[in-house]
Image (cartoon, coloured by chain):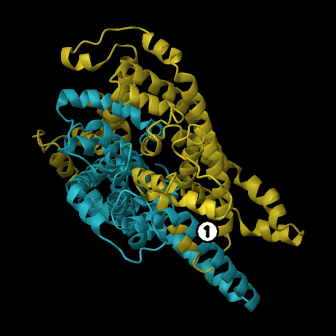
Chain colours: A cyan, B yellow
């Protein structure tokens, strides 16, 4: 699988669209409108659960699910309760996710550059190891980390969760950034080295700025992976001091759900990063999805 | 890390002039190596420093992979051969028991059902995701207004936290007041509300359904990428011969998509076989163990029963199965690259 440079993809897509437009006759235009309509229907079916989550979150609170198709009289009781009960957990999730972004970019970006440009003999072997590491079931890591964290006192700690969540992010970040960095012409870095810049300085002041797009894509996905993590939240915390919001939702679910609007309001709040990034940073998300497409 | 050895291993490459020695290289090395004091070093020494700096680019990531992927795999193997329970955390003792944990696993009542459920869950999920994903990818290959935007929005189910999806689907699938039963009843498709998540006979189907929904965006994205690589000329030539629609799909799309298909299927298996979040959120392995899979077993043995040895044995079986598919994946991927 190869990473596509977002800009290149966009340009290609644009040329194609204009290409169709030029040959467009009224008949093909009508047909295209039909396709757009059909596409909207498909999307609506796929995203119906998301709509339903928002709808249910705005229903008057109670233990029943009797919800109309549209929240004509929206009630924000669910949100009030969600923020009161899950507010600290949302902040924990935010801290862990931001920590994961910083840590995994700091560890993975230099490695990606090295694997892209340093021509070590063992590059392919390293890439293979990274691919295989992504296939290791999370429960295997959780089993071992629980016992190790227990000895090291890292259970119920934000650094412990950041390190564990980085297992979702680091292999992905290395692969996606390396795919981009292999395209950087060596001459650019060479020129800086001639001017006296060291390896580290040329990486920080030349390679990283050039790789800005892939850095953003990698960072966004690292955030989403960590924000979505449930397994490590479930296994590596035992008290409610440090509790990511995914675990908060799980505990709401329990065996019997007593307050659906609070559950759904928490679900909506936990979905906000994904929804916001998909709308505001679509270019980067699309690039990450095609390039890494692994989770 | 044995630095001396690493340096020796790479000095030759560092010196061949890919990045010829420059004044100021030592500066970068010194920034990372405060311990090194002899800044005015003979030429050979500087080459070594450059190599050390280079290694420091990969060392943290290498260390992380070893500690957070290598160590857990090894630890799971040793744990599965030990009597590793809650007591171990107090006494620090975990007696070696040989293959006793594996015997416990294989003889447990839940082993058979867990294997069958894992297979059904994986096959059902992959089949559904792939067929729907392929259909949608082919649909979005036609360029029409908003097609790129709509396809991008389709990614949403994949980006949501799985536990959020589980919670949402639990409300949709609720037997008495869930919207799915209301909808199906109003259409007259069912006369009785279906106990989606509470009946042992349909729970697995419901869980598979939700997992299909989660996996569709991934399949669409990869297959769409594969479709983009099939040259338009092929379709134009086929159209001249009268092959359009279904025939174009059978004779051009499908054969040309083979490498991508094998990659998406094998990756799908590797990622589906270890799914835990969705099942825990929807059914917790129930009702009456109807949705027990290998990863649920591993989780519950370790973190509900605190039988870490047995849990590790279950997860090693999981790793073994993943490994088989990982090898298939790597072969398929290599073929895809070659072609």
In the displayed structure, does residue A270 sit left or right of residue B158?
left
x and y, in percent, of residue A83 in the image: 23, 61
- In the rendered view, tell whether residue A54 sits above or below residue B108: below
Q: Quadrant of residue A215?
A: bottom left
Q: Quadrant of the N terminus of chain B?
A: top left
The residue at 57%/23% (across/down) is B112
Does residue B131 sit above or below A120 in this rendering? below
Q: Identify whether A46 is placed above or below B95.
A: below
Residue B235 versus residue A180: which sits nearer the camera? B235
B277 to B301, vertically: above or below? below
* Residue B18 in sight here: no
The residue at the point 55 percent across, 47 percent down is B196
> On the image, which quarter does residue B216 sit in?
bottom right
- Characterize the local packing of mark 1: few (<14), some (14-19) or many (20 or more) Cα atoms within 10 angstroms: some
Q: In the shown orientation, is residue B231 left or right of residue B205?
A: right
- Residue in the foreground of this view, choosing between A138 and A132: A138
Q: Residue at x 68, y 88 (%)?
A: A22
Asked where in the image residue A238 lies, by quadrant, the reply is top left
Tell me the element at label 1: helix
Residue B234's x, y, as percent?
A: 78, 65
The reply to whether residue A89 is visible in this rendering is yes
Q: So how many labels did they put on this image?
A: 1
* Mark 1 lies on residue: A42
| Front residue of this view, candidates B170 and A198 | B170
Furthest residue toward front: B191
């Amino acid at each position: 699988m190869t990473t596509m440079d977002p800009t290149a993809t966009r340009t290609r897509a644009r040329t194609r669209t204009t290409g169709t437009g030029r040959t467009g006759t009224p008949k093909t235009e009508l047909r295209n409108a039909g396709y757009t309509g059909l596409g909207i229907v498909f999307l609506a079916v796929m995203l119906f659960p998301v709509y339903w989550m928002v709808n249910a979150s705005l229903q008057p609170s109670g233990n029943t699910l009797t919800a109309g198709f549209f929240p004509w009289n929206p009630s924000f009781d669910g949100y009030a309760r969600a923020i009161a009960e899950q507010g600290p957990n949302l902040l924990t999730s935010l801290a862990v996710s931001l920590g994961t972004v910083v840590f995994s970019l700091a560890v993975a970006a230099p490695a990606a550059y090295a694997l892209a440009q340093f021509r070590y003999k063992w590059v392919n072997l390293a890439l293979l190891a990274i691919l295989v590491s992504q296939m290791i079931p999370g429960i295997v890591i959780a089993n071992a980390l629980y016992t190790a964290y227990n000895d090291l006192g890292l259970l119920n700690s934000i650094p412990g969760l950041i390190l564990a969540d980085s297992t979702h992010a680091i292999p992905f970040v290395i692969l996606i950034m390396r795919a981009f960095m292999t395209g950087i012409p060596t001459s650019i870095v060479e020129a800086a080295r001639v001017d006296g810049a060291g390896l580290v300085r040329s990486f920080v002041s030349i390679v990283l700025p050039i790789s800005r797009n892939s850095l953003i894509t990698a960072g966004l996905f690292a955030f989403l992976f960590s924000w979505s993590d449930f397994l490590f939240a479930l296994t590596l915390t035992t008290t409610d001091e440090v509790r990511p919001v995914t675990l908060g939702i799980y505990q709401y679910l329990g065996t019997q759900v007593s307050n659906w609007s609070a559950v759904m309001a928490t679900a909506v709040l936990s979905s906000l990063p994904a929804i916001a990034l998909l709308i505001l940073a679509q270019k980067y998300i699309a690039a990450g999805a095609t390039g890494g497409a692994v989770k | 890390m044995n630095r001396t050895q690493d340096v020796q291993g790479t000095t030759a490459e560092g010196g061949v002039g890919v990045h010829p020695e420059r004044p100021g290289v030592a500066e970068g090395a010194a920034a990372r190596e405060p311990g090194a004091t002899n800044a005015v070093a003979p030429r050979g020494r500087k080459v070594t420093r450059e190599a050390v700096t280079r290694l420091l680019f990969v060392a943290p990531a290498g260390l992380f992979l070893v500690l957070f992927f290598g160590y857990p795999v090894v630890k799971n193997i040793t744990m599965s051969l030990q009597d590793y329970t809650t007591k171990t955390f107090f006494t620090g003792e975990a007696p070696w028991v040989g293959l006793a944990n594996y015997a416990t696993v294989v003889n447990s009542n839940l082993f058979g059902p867990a294997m069958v459920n894992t297979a059904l869950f994986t096959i059902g999920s992959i089949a559904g995701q792939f067929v729907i994903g392929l259909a949608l990818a082919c649909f979005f290959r036609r360029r029409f207004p908003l097609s790129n935007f709509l396809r991008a929005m389709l990614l949403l189910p994949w980006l949501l936290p799985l536990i959020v999806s589980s919670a949402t689907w639990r409300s949709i699938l609720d037997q008495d007041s869930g919207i799915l039963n209301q909808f199906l009843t109003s259409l007259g498709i069912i006369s009785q509300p279906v106990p989606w998540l509470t009946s042992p006979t349909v729970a697995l189907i419901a869980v598979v359904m939700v997992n299909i929904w989660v996996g569709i965006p991934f399949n669409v994205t990869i297959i769409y990428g594969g479709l983009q690589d099939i040259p338009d000329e092929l379709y134009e030539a086929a159209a001249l011969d009268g092959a359009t629609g279904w025939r174009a799909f059978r004779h051009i799309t499908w054969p040309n998509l083979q490498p991508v298909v094998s990659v998406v299927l094998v990756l799908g298996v590797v990622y589906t076989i270890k799914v835990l979040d969705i099942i825990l959120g929807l059914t917790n392995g129930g009702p009456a163990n109807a949705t027990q899979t290998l990863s649920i077993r591993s989780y519950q043995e370790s973190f509900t029963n605190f039988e870490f040895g047995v849990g590790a044995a279950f997860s090693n079986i999981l790793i073994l199965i993943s490994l088989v598919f990982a090898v298939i994946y790597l072969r398929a991927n290599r073929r895809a690259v070659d072609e």
